[in-house]
Amino acid sequence: MHYECFGLLDLQGSHRMQGRGSLSSNTVNLSTQSWGCLPANFLPFGFGDTLNPVSDDGSSPAISLQQPFRYFGRTHSQIFVNNNGHLTFAAPRSSYTPIQNPGIDIIAPFWTDLDNRRGGTISYRQDKSSAVLAQVTAAVKQYFPNITFSASSAFVATWANVPYYNGGGVLSFQVVLVSSVHGSFILINYGDMAATRRIWRAGYNTADSVNSFTIPVTNASELSSSSNINVNGRWSFQVDGSPNCKPMNCLIICNKSHATGNSNLTLPAHFFPFGSGEMANIISDVGSSEAIVLQQPFKFFGRTHNQIFVNNNGHLTFTEPLSAYNPSLDSGRDIIAPLWTHLDSRRGGTISYREDTSSAVLAQVTAAVNQYFPNLPLPFNTTSAFVATWNSVPYSSGEGALYDTVDSAHSSSISLLTASELSSNSNVNVNGQWVFHVYDVCDTLGCTGNEVCNFRDDYGCGCMEGQRPNPETFDATEVCASSTGTMSLSRCQLFESDFPLEILHLNDPNCTGTVEDGRVLFHFDNEVHICGTTLSSNGTHFIYQNSIHSNLPAGIISRQRWVNIAFSCEYPLIQTLSMPMDIQAQHR
């Protein structure tokens, strides 16, 4: 990975200047004070930047934007850079605990509990220099090739080598707000990101939560190698009016018209609107679109795709274009083929596509999915629709309609005698329409037969109707054997009480729970998993003691403010037990 190194010098306590050099290395020792080495995808920072106050939960003062920033229908003329990894517009925000729906317009490159008192810098500037504007203009044009764009302003905020609160590593990330008369965009750049057990969230949200997106990464360290635009450590979003939301369910709807050689057809009513504002494929025998960056990633049987190709011969692929016109059920790739055959747009017709987030289309798709899949665990709410249309395109011979996955573990083929039958057949009792469910977040949770997939602040395994919650002990059970102890809690009862599993731990915060058969297990022993266990004696027994705690900070809405469940294992003094030096001995 290529790094650029910056040295910062205090000037009157409010600005810092930088010196620059560069080096290539896979590992770089980052100072927590005045020097840092950041990946080359960062925009320059430091010189001319304003520093945020050195404060645990501090924020910048109100920053008047030289060019107002359009954000999903609202125009903001000021902004606040908050130390805990987020930008807000209406007021500063000290919150260090990420909330799914905070009720404000917020951009959060990495929302967690940070503390620049222990090192690092948080700085910002408004940049209209020709060099930076050219750089961000080129980036936006590369990631959104179908949009005319020329940047006129860039707001750059950088967190450089800022530690977590109470330690645990440092983080470097940057967010750039890019504005022009053509629209508004966000670039989020990630450098070295230390992993953490703290609660964190990366993405953005709006006051009404209609437009929101959470970067689908489970470990903070993965952010520096993740992307939605195929540039490691960089995420980009258009935010003036194109929402990007976390997909919970993904479906395919295939609409079929009359498959004939007639090029003067009126499309059936069950087709979605197409043509206006769409991109058209090149006129070619076996051509394809360019790589289309999906503003909302599409989950397809366990894999998440950030791009897609519309291929002229009647299929969609994700990793590369495909010119093949002979259909193959085991194609060795993820593919969606509404009509895979030899088509030739040189002889007429159009092949076009768009990603649609208009309220009318989203409402139409939502209604269709809820009609065709009435037994989903939760009502379906569409947040994005990618529409590709082959209109009156002539074909040669041989046809097939199917989808398939790279390992062929999931595939389906529409079995009909002739292509003309597609317009009068269906799997949802709507002639000419076929619908398939290709991803469900509930399938990934592993809920048991005594649990049900449910949604509160996020998806999880809830308790079946009729089960009585026990918010005091969460149906705790304890097992003691040979100087070891295990305490288990009901996963569904923790979920119903709004306790995420990742915030629970034993006396040692590094000792977290594991899930088995709907139970969350916490284990200690007197060898390698001591986990803050104490050992005492009451005159007749050895007593091993530990507790389950939560690190639930203020700001999380929960029926339980904290958890503290103590448990112990007792053994007669006549039993021979080892007591490692790491176990704290207590006397009674």
Image (cartoon, grey):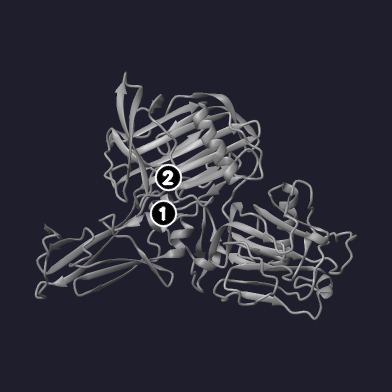
Relative to 533, say whether 4 is above or below: above
Q: Residue at x 32, y 60 (%)?
A: 512
Q: Which mark is residue 265?
A: none
Q: Is residue 249 above or below residue 573?
A: above
Instruction: Using a 10 Å C-alpha cutoff, classify the residue at mark 1 as few (fewer than 14 neighbours), some (14 to 19) or many (20 or more).
Output: some
Residues under numbered marks 1 and 2 in contact, where contact means CB atoms less than 8 Å apart: no
Mark number, residue 222: 1
Question: What amino acid is found at the position of numbered circle 2 in the picture?
Answer: Tyr
Residue 190 - label = 2
Q: Residue at x 85, y 59 (%)?
A: 269
Residue shown at the point (51%, 63%) measured from the top left: 462
| 334 to 30, vertically: above or below | below
Q: Nearer the viewer, residue 324 or 528?
A: 324
In terms of image quadrants, where is residue 4?
A: top left
Give the distance between the C-alpha atoms of the residues marked 1 and 2, in whole angstroms.
10 Å
Callout 1 amino acid:
Glu
